[in-house]
Image (cartoon, rainbow, N blue to C red):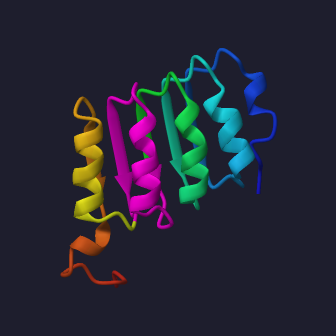
Amino acid sequence: MPTLQNIALLKNLTHLTVWNFATSESAMKEISSLQHLKHLGLHGNITDAELRELTSSTSIQNLDINSRLVTDEGLQSLANLHTLNELHMRSSRVTLHGKVKLQEALPQCDLDVLDLDQFTDVPDKIQN
């Protein structure tokens, strides 16, 4: 699996989407140091601890996360991203309480948080 080692060398990067990369807290810290990064997509096994490392970012405006490992704790760490205007989150373990709390902390942010477990009539496996 590829890694995000040395991503901070791309100093003028404005958009980054990561699919199934080996992430780590140190990689997220490097990503948060990218001063021109506006749009970030994280798709894979992103953890709450890794999300916490993004909170020092001063530029991320749009964040797209798809991870079954993110909980209310990770979501609340995003409350420190004062530049965040849009958050799209899929397949997380975030509760309604967590969503409301983040919306209160970031009223300017358009939250689009969807957990597929909310739909009880969707079968686990679609058969042909």
Q: Nearer the viewer, residue 61 or 120?
A: 61
Residue 17 position, x and y percent, is 56, 38
Q: How many marks?
A: 0
Magenta stretch: includes residue 90 = yes
**What's the residue at 56%, 39% (across, down)?**
54
16 versus 50 height, above or below: above
Residue 125 position, x and y percent, is 37, 83
| Quadrant where the image shows the C terminus | bottom left
State which region is magenta: 65-92
**What's the residue at 24%, 43% (across, down)?**
103
**Residue 86 figure quarter:** top left
In the image: residue 62, left or right of residue 104: right
Q: Residue furthest left?
A: 121
**Residue 31 figure quarter:** top right
37 versus 101 height, above or below: above
97 versus 79 height, above or below: below
Q: Nearer the viewer, residue 108 or 112?
A: 108
Magenta stretch: includes residue 117 = no
Residue 1 position, x and y percent, is 76, 57
**What's the residue at 40%, 50% (across, down)?**
76
In the image: residue 79, left or right of residue 8: left
**What's the residue at 33%, 81% (across, down)?**
126
In the image: residue 127, left or right of residue 21: left
Q: Nearer the viewer, residue 78 or 40?
A: 78
Residue 111 position, x and y percent, is 26, 43
